[in-house]
Protein backbone atom coordinates (compact mmCIF):
# COMPACT_ATOMS: atom_id res chain seq x y z
CA UNK A 1 0.00 0.00 0.00
CA UNK A 2 2.76 2.37 1.04
CA UNK A 3 4.80 1.66 -2.04
CA UNK A 4 1.66 2.05 -4.23
CA UNK A 5 0.96 5.58 -2.80
CA UNK A 6 4.62 6.51 -3.17
CA UNK A 7 4.57 5.35 -6.77
CA UNK A 8 1.48 7.49 -7.49
CA UNK A 9 3.09 10.51 -5.79
CA UNK A 10 6.31 10.04 -7.77
CA UNK A 11 4.32 9.78 -11.00
CA UNK A 12 2.31 12.95 -10.25
CA UNK A 13 5.45 14.87 -9.28
CA UNK A 14 7.32 13.58 -12.30
CA UNK A 15 4.43 14.51 -14.57
CA UNK A 16 4.27 18.00 -13.11
CA UNK A 17 8.02 18.39 -13.59
CA UNK A 18 7.85 17.22 -17.20
CA UNK A 19 4.89 19.56 -17.89
CA UNK A 20 6.76 22.47 -16.30
CA UNK A 21 9.91 21.75 -18.31
CA UNK A 22 7.97 21.45 -21.60
CA UNK A 23 6.03 24.61 -20.90
CA UNK A 24 9.18 26.59 -20.23
CA UNK A 25 10.92 25.18 -23.29
CA UNK A 26 8.00 26.26 -25.48
CA UNK A 27 8.10 29.69 -23.91
CA UNK A 28 11.78 30.02 -24.70
CA UNK A 29 11.20 28.88 -28.29
CA UNK A 30 8.38 31.35 -28.98
CA UNK A 31 10.29 34.30 -27.63
CA UNK A 32 8.06 36.39 -25.46
CA UNK A 33 7.28 39.98 -26.31
CA UNK A 34 9.51 42.23 -24.28
CA UNK A 35 6.59 44.55 -23.69
CA UNK A 36 3.17 43.53 -22.33
CA UNK A 37 0.29 45.49 -23.73
CA UNK A 38 -0.75 47.65 -20.84
CA UNK A 39 -2.95 50.48 -21.95
CA UNK A 40 -2.16 53.92 -20.59
CA UNK A 41 -4.39 56.84 -21.52
CA UNK A 42 -2.73 60.22 -21.34
CA UNK A 43 -5.37 62.95 -21.08
CA UNK A 44 -5.32 66.10 -23.17
CA UNK A 45 -3.66 68.31 -20.55
CA UNK A 46 -0.84 65.82 -19.84
CA UNK A 47 0.73 65.61 -23.31
CA UNK A 48 2.14 68.13 -25.78
CA UNK A 49 0.22 66.98 -28.90
CA UNK A 50 -1.83 69.98 -29.92
CA UNK A 51 -4.64 69.95 -32.49
CA UNK A 52 -3.25 73.17 -33.91
CA UNK A 53 -0.28 71.20 -35.31
CA UNK A 54 -2.38 68.41 -36.81
CA UNK A 55 -3.44 68.49 -40.43
CA UNK A 56 -7.11 69.47 -40.86
CA UNK A 57 -7.53 66.70 -43.41
CA UNK A 58 -6.27 64.06 -40.98
CA UNK A 59 -8.71 65.34 -38.34
CA UNK A 60 -11.53 65.26 -40.91
CA UNK A 61 -10.79 61.59 -41.64
CA UNK A 62 -10.83 60.43 -38.03
CA UNK A 63 -13.88 62.55 -37.18
CA UNK A 64 -15.82 61.13 -40.12
CA UNK A 65 -14.93 57.56 -39.19
CA UNK A 66 -15.87 58.23 -35.55
CA UNK A 67 -19.19 59.78 -36.56
CA UNK A 68 -20.00 56.58 -38.48
CA UNK A 69 -19.42 54.49 -35.34
CA UNK A 70 -15.87 53.32 -36.10
CA UNK A 71 -12.80 53.68 -33.94
CA UNK A 72 -10.14 55.80 -35.61
CA UNK A 73 -6.85 57.25 -34.38
CA UNK A 74 -3.86 59.16 -35.66
CA UNK A 75 -0.86 56.93 -35.17
CA UNK A 76 2.81 56.42 -35.90
CA UNK A 77 5.46 58.97 -36.80
CA UNK A 78 3.07 61.93 -36.69
CA UNK A 79 2.30 61.54 -32.96
CA UNK A 80 5.94 60.71 -32.18
CA UNK A 81 7.11 63.84 -34.04
CA UNK A 82 4.48 66.08 -32.41
CA UNK A 83 5.64 64.81 -29.01
CA UNK A 84 9.16 65.86 -29.96
CA UNK A 85 8.03 69.22 -31.33
CA UNK A 86 9.03 68.20 -34.85
CA UNK A 87 7.10 68.75 -38.05
CA UNK A 88 5.43 65.44 -39.08
CA UNK A 89 6.13 64.26 -42.62
CA UNK A 90 2.68 62.72 -43.00
CA UNK A 91 -0.36 61.73 -40.94
CA UNK A 92 -1.43 58.11 -40.73
CA UNK A 93 -4.78 56.83 -39.49
CA UNK A 94 -5.55 53.43 -37.92
CA UNK A 95 -9.15 52.24 -37.65
CA UNK A 96 -11.31 49.20 -37.04
CA UNK A 97 -13.18 49.90 -40.31
CA UNK A 98 -12.19 47.52 -43.11
CA UNK A 99 -10.42 48.97 -46.15
CA UNK A 100 -13.59 48.43 -48.18
CA UNK A 101 -15.67 50.33 -45.57
CA UNK A 102 -13.19 53.21 -45.61
CA UNK A 103 -13.21 53.26 -49.39
CA UNK A 104 -17.03 53.47 -49.35
CA UNK A 105 -17.05 56.28 -46.77
CA UNK A 106 -14.74 58.61 -48.68
CA UNK A 107 -15.53 59.35 -52.29
CA UNK A 108 -12.09 60.87 -52.78
CA UNK A 109 -10.25 57.65 -51.86
CA UNK A 110 -8.60 54.62 -53.44
CA UNK A 111 -7.68 51.15 -52.27
CA UNK A 112 -4.01 50.34 -52.68
CA UNK A 113 -1.50 47.57 -51.97
CA UNK A 114 -1.62 43.81 -51.94
CA UNK A 115 1.00 43.03 -49.32
CA UNK A 116 -0.66 45.57 -47.05
CA UNK A 117 -4.13 46.71 -48.11
CA UNK A 118 -4.53 50.42 -47.39
CA UNK A 119 -6.79 53.27 -48.35
CA UNK A 120 -5.49 56.63 -49.52
CA UNK A 121 -7.91 59.47 -48.89
CA UNK A 122 -7.07 62.34 -51.21
CA UNK A 123 -7.55 66.06 -50.56
CA UNK A 124 -6.12 67.78 -53.61
CA UNK A 125 -2.37 67.17 -53.31
CA UNK A 126 -2.61 66.11 -49.68
CA UNK A 127 -3.13 62.44 -48.87
CA UNK A 128 -4.06 60.66 -45.64
CA UNK A 129 -3.22 56.97 -45.37
CA UNK A 130 -5.81 54.86 -43.56
CA UNK A 131 -4.92 51.35 -42.36
CA UNK A 132 -7.18 48.82 -40.70
CA UNK A 133 -5.97 47.53 -37.29
CA UNK A 134 -3.69 44.56 -37.95
CA UNK A 135 -2.84 41.62 -35.74
CA UNK A 136 0.36 39.80 -34.98
CA UNK A 137 0.70 36.74 -37.21
CA UNK A 138 1.52 34.21 -34.53
CA UNK A 139 -1.90 34.76 -32.98
CA UNK A 140 -3.59 33.86 -36.25
CA UNK A 141 -1.97 30.72 -37.57
CA UNK A 142 -3.88 29.04 -40.32
CA UNK A 143 -5.42 32.21 -41.72
CA UNK A 144 -4.63 32.57 -45.37
CA UNK A 145 -4.50 36.31 -45.21
CA UNK A 146 -0.93 36.31 -44.02
CA UNK A 147 2.11 34.38 -45.18
CA UNK A 148 5.80 34.07 -44.33
CA UNK A 149 8.86 33.09 -46.33
CA UNK A 150 11.21 30.34 -45.09
CA UNK A 151 13.36 32.95 -43.34
CA UNK A 152 10.31 34.24 -41.42
CA UNK A 153 9.79 37.30 -43.62
CA UNK A 154 6.20 38.55 -43.87
CA UNK A 155 5.04 38.24 -47.45
CA UNK A 156 1.44 39.25 -46.95
CA UNK A 157 -0.14 40.99 -43.99
CA UNK A 158 -3.89 41.36 -44.12
CA UNK A 159 -4.82 39.84 -40.78
CA UNK A 160 -7.07 42.28 -38.99
CA UNK A 161 -7.26 42.59 -35.23
CA UNK A 162 -7.93 44.84 -32.27
CA UNK A 163 -6.29 48.12 -31.43
CA UNK A 164 -3.99 46.30 -28.95
CA UNK A 165 -2.98 43.83 -31.67
CA UNK A 166 -2.29 46.74 -33.97
CA UNK A 167 -0.01 48.40 -31.42
CA UNK A 168 1.96 45.20 -30.87
CA UNK A 169 2.72 44.63 -34.55
CA UNK A 170 4.15 48.12 -35.05
CA UNK A 171 7.91 48.46 -35.17
CA UNK A 172 9.10 50.74 -32.33
CA UNK A 173 7.43 51.70 -29.07
CA UNK A 174 7.65 55.39 -30.00
CA UNK A 175 5.76 54.62 -33.22
CA UNK A 176 2.87 52.96 -31.40
CA UNK A 177 1.16 56.01 -29.88
CA UNK A 178 -2.46 56.71 -30.84
CA UNK A 179 -4.21 60.09 -30.78
CA UNK A 180 -7.92 59.95 -30.10
CA UNK A 181 -9.83 62.79 -31.78
CA UNK A 182 -12.88 62.32 -29.54
CA UNK A 183 -11.28 63.36 -26.24
CA UNK A 184 -7.83 64.45 -27.52
CA UNK A 185 -6.04 61.86 -25.40
CA UNK A 186 -3.00 59.80 -26.39
CA UNK A 187 -3.16 56.03 -25.95
CA UNK A 188 0.11 54.23 -25.18
CA UNK A 189 0.33 50.41 -25.07
CA UNK A 190 4.11 49.95 -25.09
CA UNK A 191 5.62 52.59 -22.83
CA UNK A 192 6.33 54.68 -25.89
CA UNK A 193 5.99 57.96 -24.00
CA UNK A 194 8.69 56.93 -21.54
CA UNK A 195 10.97 55.94 -24.45
CA UNK A 196 10.37 59.32 -26.06
CA UNK A 197 11.31 60.97 -22.78
CA UNK A 198 14.59 59.06 -22.55
CA UNK A 199 15.32 59.15 -26.30
CA UNK A 200 15.25 55.38 -26.69
CA UNK A 201 14.44 53.44 -29.84
CA UNK A 202 13.05 50.08 -28.75
CA UNK A 203 11.67 47.42 -31.03
CA UNK A 204 8.36 45.93 -29.85
CA UNK A 205 8.57 42.16 -29.22
CA UNK A 206 11.51 39.86 -29.76
CA UNK A 207 14.00 41.78 -31.94
CA UNK A 208 15.41 38.80 -33.85
CA UNK A 209 11.93 37.57 -34.82
CA UNK A 210 10.83 41.08 -35.76
CA UNK A 211 13.92 41.68 -37.93
CA UNK A 212 13.38 38.35 -39.67
CA UNK A 213 9.73 39.22 -40.29
CA UNK A 214 10.78 42.44 -41.99
CA UNK A 215 14.51 43.20 -42.35
CA UNK A 216 13.70 46.77 -43.43
CA UNK A 217 13.04 47.42 -39.72
CA UNK A 218 16.84 47.48 -39.30
CA UNK A 219 17.06 50.33 -41.80
CA UNK A 220 14.20 52.07 -40.04
CA UNK A 221 16.05 51.71 -36.72
CA UNK A 222 19.07 53.48 -38.18
CA UNK A 223 16.91 56.11 -39.88
CA UNK A 224 15.06 57.05 -36.70
CA UNK A 225 18.21 56.92 -34.56
CA UNK A 226 19.77 59.49 -36.90
CA UNK A 227 16.66 61.63 -37.40
CA UNK A 228 15.58 61.78 -33.76
CA UNK A 229 19.07 61.57 -32.29
CA UNK A 230 17.86 58.59 -30.20
CA UNK A 231 19.93 55.69 -28.87
CA UNK A 232 18.88 52.16 -29.62
CA UNK A 233 17.97 49.94 -26.67
CA UNK A 234 20.71 47.26 -26.31
CA UNK A 235 18.46 44.34 -27.37
CA UNK A 236 17.25 46.34 -30.38
CA UNK A 237 20.78 47.24 -31.42
CA UNK A 238 22.61 43.97 -30.80
CA UNK A 239 21.32 41.70 -33.60
CA UNK A 240 21.57 44.28 -36.40
CA UNK A 241 25.22 43.84 -37.35
CA UNK A 242 24.67 40.10 -37.84
CA UNK A 243 21.39 40.24 -39.73
CA UNK A 244 22.24 42.74 -42.47
CA UNK A 245 22.40 40.03 -45.12
CA UNK A 246 18.61 39.50 -44.71
CA UNK A 247 18.20 42.67 -46.74
CA UNK A 248 19.31 40.78 -49.82
CA UNK A 249 15.86 39.13 -49.94
CA UNK A 250 14.00 42.43 -50.02
CA UNK A 251 12.71 43.55 -53.44
CA UNK A 252 15.16 46.05 -54.93
CA UNK A 253 12.40 48.57 -55.70
CA UNK A 254 11.49 48.76 -51.99
CA UNK A 255 15.15 49.19 -51.08
CA UNK A 256 15.49 52.06 -53.55
CA UNK A 257 12.63 53.86 -51.77
CA UNK A 258 14.19 53.14 -48.38
CA UNK A 259 17.57 54.49 -49.52
CA UNK A 260 15.92 57.79 -50.46
CA UNK A 261 14.22 57.98 -47.06
CA UNK A 262 17.54 57.18 -45.40
CA UNK A 263 19.77 59.57 -47.29
CA UNK A 264 17.49 62.33 -48.56
CA UNK A 265 15.56 63.25 -45.43
CA UNK A 266 17.94 65.86 -44.08
CA UNK A 267 20.10 63.59 -41.86
CA UNK A 268 22.06 61.83 -44.58
CA UNK A 269 25.55 62.21 -43.11
CA UNK A 270 24.64 60.74 -39.72
CA UNK A 271 22.52 58.01 -41.32
CA UNK A 272 25.34 57.00 -43.67
CA UNK A 273 27.77 56.77 -40.75
CA UNK A 274 25.33 54.60 -38.80
CA UNK A 275 24.63 52.37 -41.80
CA UNK A 276 28.37 51.71 -42.07
CA UNK A 277 28.70 51.20 -38.33
CA UNK A 278 25.91 48.59 -38.25
CA UNK A 279 27.12 46.92 -41.46
CA UNK A 280 23.95 47.73 -43.30
CA UNK A 281 25.62 49.77 -46.01
CA UNK A 282 27.30 46.78 -47.69
CA UNK A 283 24.06 44.92 -48.49
CA UNK A 284 22.66 48.13 -50.03
CA UNK A 285 25.76 49.31 -51.92
CA UNK A 286 28.24 46.41 -52.12
CA UNK A 287 30.49 47.96 -54.77
CA UNK A 288 30.67 51.30 -52.95
CA UNK A 289 31.36 49.57 -49.65
CA UNK A 290 34.20 47.65 -51.27
CA UNK A 291 35.64 50.85 -52.80
CA UNK A 292 35.41 52.58 -49.42
CA UNK A 293 37.24 49.76 -47.64
CA UNK A 294 39.95 49.62 -50.29
CA UNK A 295 40.34 53.38 -50.23
CA UNK A 296 40.76 53.39 -46.46
CA UNK A 297 43.49 50.77 -46.84
CA UNK A 298 45.18 52.95 -49.41
CA UNK A 299 44.78 56.06 -47.23
CA UNK A 300 42.74 57.60 -50.03
CA UNK A 301 40.39 60.10 -48.46
CA UNK A 302 38.65 61.28 -51.66
CA UNK A 303 36.32 58.32 -51.86
CA UNK A 304 34.89 58.82 -48.38
CA UNK A 305 35.02 62.61 -48.60
CA UNK A 306 33.02 62.73 -51.84
CA UNK A 307 30.16 60.78 -50.30
CA UNK A 308 30.19 62.88 -47.14
CA UNK A 309 30.33 66.14 -49.13
CA UNK A 310 27.40 65.07 -51.31
CA UNK A 311 25.35 64.09 -48.27
CA UNK A 312 26.23 67.36 -46.53
CA UNK A 313 25.06 69.27 -49.57
CA UNK A 314 21.84 67.19 -49.72
CA UNK A 315 21.18 67.76 -46.00
CA UNK A 316 21.65 71.51 -46.50
CA UNK A 317 19.26 71.60 -49.45
CA UNK A 318 16.60 69.60 -47.59
CA UNK A 319 16.80 72.05 -44.68
CA UNK A 320 16.35 74.94 -47.10
CA UNK A 321 13.39 73.18 -48.78
CA UNK A 322 15.26 73.06 -52.07
CA UNK A 323 14.76 70.10 -54.41
CA UNK A 324 17.15 67.15 -54.35
CA UNK A 325 17.49 64.47 -57.01
CA UNK A 326 18.28 60.81 -56.39
CA UNK A 327 20.48 60.97 -59.50
CA UNK A 328 22.97 63.25 -57.75
CA UNK A 329 23.11 61.00 -54.70
CA UNK A 330 23.67 57.87 -56.78
CA UNK A 331 26.24 59.65 -58.97
CA UNK A 332 28.26 60.38 -55.83
CA UNK A 333 27.80 56.97 -54.22
CA UNK A 334 28.77 55.03 -57.34
CA UNK A 335 31.50 57.34 -58.66
CA UNK A 336 34.39 55.48 -57.02
CA UNK A 337 33.37 51.95 -58.05
CA UNK A 338 32.81 53.27 -61.57
CA UNK A 339 36.27 54.85 -61.74
CA UNK A 340 37.95 51.79 -60.29
CA UNK A 341 36.34 49.65 -62.94
CA UNK A 342 37.20 52.12 -65.72
CA UNK A 343 40.82 52.05 -64.58
CA UNK A 344 40.86 48.28 -64.61
CA UNK A 345 39.47 48.25 -68.15
CA UNK A 346 42.18 50.67 -69.26
CA UNK A 347 45.01 48.88 -67.52
CA UNK A 348 44.02 45.28 -68.16
CA UNK A 349 42.33 45.53 -71.53
CA UNK A 350 44.07 48.59 -72.95
CA UNK A 351 40.73 50.32 -73.48
CA UNK A 352 40.91 54.07 -74.20
CA UNK A 353 39.57 56.31 -71.42
CA UNK A 354 36.24 57.39 -72.89
CA UNK A 355 34.89 53.92 -73.82
CA UNK A 356 36.31 52.53 -70.56
CA UNK A 357 34.42 55.23 -68.69
CA UNK A 358 31.20 54.48 -70.56
CA UNK A 359 31.41 50.72 -70.15
CA UNK A 360 32.23 51.04 -66.47
CA UNK A 361 29.26 53.40 -65.99
CA UNK A 362 26.88 50.93 -67.54
CA UNK A 363 28.23 47.93 -65.61
CA UNK A 364 28.25 49.65 -62.22
CA UNK A 365 24.70 51.01 -62.64
CA UNK A 366 23.37 47.65 -63.86
CA UNK A 367 24.93 45.82 -60.91
CA UNK A 368 23.63 48.36 -58.44
CA UNK A 369 20.09 47.92 -59.79
CA UNK A 370 20.14 44.33 -58.47
CA UNK A 371 20.26 45.83 -54.98
CA UNK A 372 18.37 49.12 -55.26
CA UNK A 373 16.35 49.35 -58.49
CA UNK A 374 17.21 52.81 -59.84
CA UNK A 375 14.39 54.07 -62.08
CA UNK A 376 15.59 54.69 -65.60
CA UNK A 377 15.10 58.46 -65.55
CA UNK A 378 17.56 58.68 -62.66
CA UNK A 379 20.11 56.19 -63.99
CA UNK A 380 20.18 58.12 -67.31
CA UNK A 381 20.87 61.29 -65.37
CA UNK A 382 23.66 59.63 -63.38
CA UNK A 383 25.33 58.74 -66.67
CA UNK A 384 24.87 62.29 -67.99
CA UNK A 385 26.45 63.74 -64.85
CA UNK A 386 29.41 61.36 -65.21
CA UNK A 387 29.82 61.86 -68.98
CA UNK A 388 29.88 65.62 -68.54
CA UNK A 389 32.72 65.40 -66.01
CA UNK A 390 35.29 64.70 -68.70
CA UNK A 391 34.07 67.55 -70.86
CA UNK A 392 33.87 70.02 -67.99
CA UNK A 393 37.42 69.18 -67.03
CA UNK A 394 38.75 69.49 -70.57
CA UNK A 395 37.16 72.90 -71.20
CA UNK A 396 37.45 72.73 -74.98
CA UNK A 397 36.75 76.29 -76.16
CA UNK A 398 34.40 75.27 -78.96
CA UNK A 399 32.19 73.32 -76.57
CA UNK A 400 31.90 75.81 -73.72
CA UNK A 401 28.67 77.51 -74.90
CA UNK A 402 26.87 74.26 -75.61
CA UNK A 403 28.01 72.81 -72.28
CA UNK A 404 26.55 75.82 -70.46
CA UNK A 405 23.25 75.14 -72.27
CA UNK A 406 23.25 71.41 -71.59
CA UNK A 407 20.10 70.40 -69.65
CA UNK A 408 22.21 68.53 -67.08
CA UNK A 409 24.92 71.18 -66.84
CA UNK A 410 23.88 72.38 -63.41
CA UNK A 411 23.95 68.93 -61.82
CA UNK A 412 27.23 68.05 -63.52
CA UNK A 413 28.79 71.36 -62.44
CA UNK A 414 27.66 70.84 -58.84
CA UNK A 415 29.19 67.38 -58.98
CA UNK A 416 32.48 68.75 -60.34
CA UNK A 417 32.65 71.25 -57.48
CA UNK A 418 31.91 68.48 -55.00
CA UNK A 419 34.79 66.43 -56.38
CA UNK A 420 37.11 69.38 -55.89
CA UNK A 421 35.82 69.94 -52.37
CA UNK A 422 36.51 66.33 -51.56
CA UNK A 423 40.16 66.82 -52.42
CA UNK A 424 40.52 65.83 -56.09
CA UNK A 425 42.93 67.97 -58.08
CA UNK A 426 40.98 69.09 -61.16
CA UNK A 427 43.26 72.03 -62.12
CA UNK A 428 40.72 74.52 -60.71
CA UNK A 429 38.11 73.54 -63.31
CA UNK A 430 35.31 74.04 -60.75
CA UNK A 431 36.40 77.61 -60.03
CA UNK A 432 36.63 78.33 -63.77
CA UNK A 433 33.04 77.18 -64.39
CA UNK A 434 31.83 79.12 -61.37
CA UNK A 435 33.36 82.30 -62.76
CA UNK A 436 32.11 81.93 -66.31
CA UNK A 437 28.51 81.49 -65.14
CA UNK A 438 28.67 84.82 -63.32
CA UNK A 439 29.69 86.81 -66.43
CA UNK A 440 27.69 88.43 -69.23
CA UNK A 441 28.15 87.45 -72.89
CA UNK A 442 31.23 89.67 -73.38
CA UNK A 443 32.89 88.39 -70.26
CA UNK A 444 32.25 84.82 -71.27
CA UNK A 445 33.77 85.38 -74.71
CA UNK A 446 36.85 86.85 -73.11
CA UNK A 447 37.21 83.86 -70.80
CA UNK A 448 36.81 81.40 -73.66
CA UNK A 449 39.29 83.38 -75.74
CA UNK A 450 41.89 83.33 -73.04
CA UNK A 451 41.35 79.59 -72.76
CA UNK A 452 42.03 79.28 -76.50
CA UNK A 453 45.17 81.38 -76.36
CA UNK A 454 46.47 79.42 -73.38
CA UNK A 455 45.77 76.11 -75.00
CA UNK A 456 46.66 77.47 -78.45
CA UNK A 457 43.98 75.18 -79.85
CA UNK A 458 42.05 77.74 -81.82
CA UNK A 459 44.97 79.20 -83.74
CA UNK A 460 46.56 75.92 -84.53
CA UNK A 461 43.37 73.98 -85.07
CA UNK A 462 42.50 75.56 -88.44
CA UNK A 463 45.95 75.67 -89.93
CA UNK A 464 47.41 72.39 -88.89
CA UNK A 465 46.44 69.03 -90.18
CA UNK A 466 43.80 67.54 -87.88
CA UNK A 467 45.31 64.97 -85.60
CA UNK A 468 43.56 62.64 -83.22
CA UNK A 469 44.26 64.03 -79.80
CA UNK A 470 45.72 61.64 -77.27
CA UNK A 471 44.05 61.66 -73.86
CA UNK A 472 45.68 64.27 -71.67
CA UNK A 473 46.78 63.62 -68.17
CA UNK A 474 44.07 65.88 -66.79
CA UNK A 475 41.22 63.95 -68.44
CA UNK A 476 38.69 62.77 -65.91
CA UNK A 477 39.59 59.10 -66.04
CA UNK A 478 43.34 59.39 -66.21
CA UNK A 479 43.42 62.21 -63.72
CA UNK A 480 41.40 60.15 -61.33
CA UNK A 481 43.93 57.42 -61.72
CA UNK A 482 46.68 59.71 -60.58
CA UNK A 483 44.42 60.90 -57.77
CA UNK A 484 43.64 57.41 -56.61
CA UNK A 485 46.85 55.51 -56.99
P1 LIG B 1 8.20 59.01 -41.05
O1 LIG B 1 6.86 59.15 -41.73
O2 LIG B 1 8.62 60.19 -40.26
O3 LIG B 1 9.24 58.49 -41.94
P2 LIG B 1 6.84 56.93 -39.62
O4 LIG B 1 7.14 56.26 -38.31
O5 LIG B 1 5.53 57.65 -39.70
O6 LIG B 1 8.04 57.87 -39.93
P3 LIG B 1 5.88 55.42 -41.84
O7 LIG B 1 6.65 54.67 -42.85
O8 LIG B 1 5.08 56.60 -42.27
O9 LIG B 1 6.92 55.84 -40.73
O10 LIG B 1 4.96 54.37 -41.10
C1 LIG B 1 3.88 54.75 -40.24
C2 LIG B 1 3.81 53.79 -39.06
O11 LIG B 1 3.57 52.46 -39.52
C3 LIG B 1 5.10 53.66 -38.24
O12 LIG B 1 5.18 54.68 -37.28
C4 LIG B 1 4.94 52.30 -37.60
O13 LIG B 1 4.05 52.35 -36.51
C5 LIG B 1 4.27 51.51 -38.71
N1 LIG B 1 5.26 50.85 -39.57
C6 LIG B 1 5.80 51.31 -40.71
N2 LIG B 1 6.66 50.42 -41.24
C7 LIG B 1 6.66 49.36 -40.42
C8 LIG B 1 7.33 48.09 -40.42
N3 LIG B 1 8.19 47.78 -41.39
N4 LIG B 1 7.06 47.25 -39.40
C9 LIG B 1 6.18 47.56 -38.42
N5 LIG B 1 5.53 48.72 -38.36
C10 LIG B 1 5.75 49.62 -39.34
MG1 LIG C 1 4.72 58.55 -41.38
Image: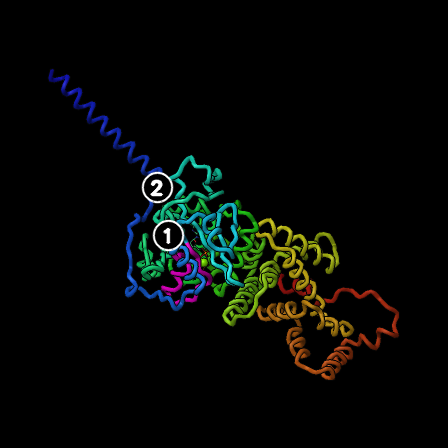
Depicted 306 relative to depicted 243: above or below? below
Residue reaching furthest bottom? 442
Residue 3, picture quadrant: top left
Observer-nearest residue: 263 or 67? 67
Where does ligand 2 appear, by image quarter?
Answer: bottom left
Residue 31 marker = 2
Residue at horizontal 29 percent and vertical 57 percent from the top = 41
Whether the residue under disc 1 has CB within 8 Å of ligand 1? no
Locate the N terminus and report the quarter of the image it occupies.
top left
Tell me residue 121's x, y (percent): 49, 57
Q: Residues within 10 Å of mark 2 (few under 14, many from 20)?
A: few
Considering the numbered disc 1 on the image, is that residue within a helix, a strand or a loop? loop
Residue at horizontal 48 percent and vertical 43 percent from the top = 156
State which region is magenta: 72-93
Between disc 1 and disc 2, the foreground one is 1
Depicted 19 relative to depicted 136: above or below? above
Considering the numbered disc 2 on the image, is that residue within a helix, a strand or a loop? loop
Tell me residue 42's x, y (percent): 29, 59
Tell me residue 202's x, y (percent): 36, 54
Observer-nearest residue: 174 or 468? 174
Q: Which residue in the structure is indicated by mark 1?
A: 69
Observer-nearest residue: 3 or 205? 205
Is residue 399 shown left or right of residue 185? Answer: right
Q: CA distance from mark 1 to mark 2?
A: 37 Å
Amino acid sequence: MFSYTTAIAVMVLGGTLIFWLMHNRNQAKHSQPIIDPEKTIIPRDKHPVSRRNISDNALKVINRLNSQGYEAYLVGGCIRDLYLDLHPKDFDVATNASPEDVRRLFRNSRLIGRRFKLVHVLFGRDMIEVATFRANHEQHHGQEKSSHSDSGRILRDNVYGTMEDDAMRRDFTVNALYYDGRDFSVVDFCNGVEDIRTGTLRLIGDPITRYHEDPVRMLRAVRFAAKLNFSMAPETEKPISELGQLLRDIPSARLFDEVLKLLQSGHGVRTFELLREYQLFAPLFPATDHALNEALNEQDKHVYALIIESLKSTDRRVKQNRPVTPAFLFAALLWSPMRRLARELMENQGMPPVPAFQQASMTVITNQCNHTAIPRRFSMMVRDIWDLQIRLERRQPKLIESLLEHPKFRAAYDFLVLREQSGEDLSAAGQWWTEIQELDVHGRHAMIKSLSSHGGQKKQGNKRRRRRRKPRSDDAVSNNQSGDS
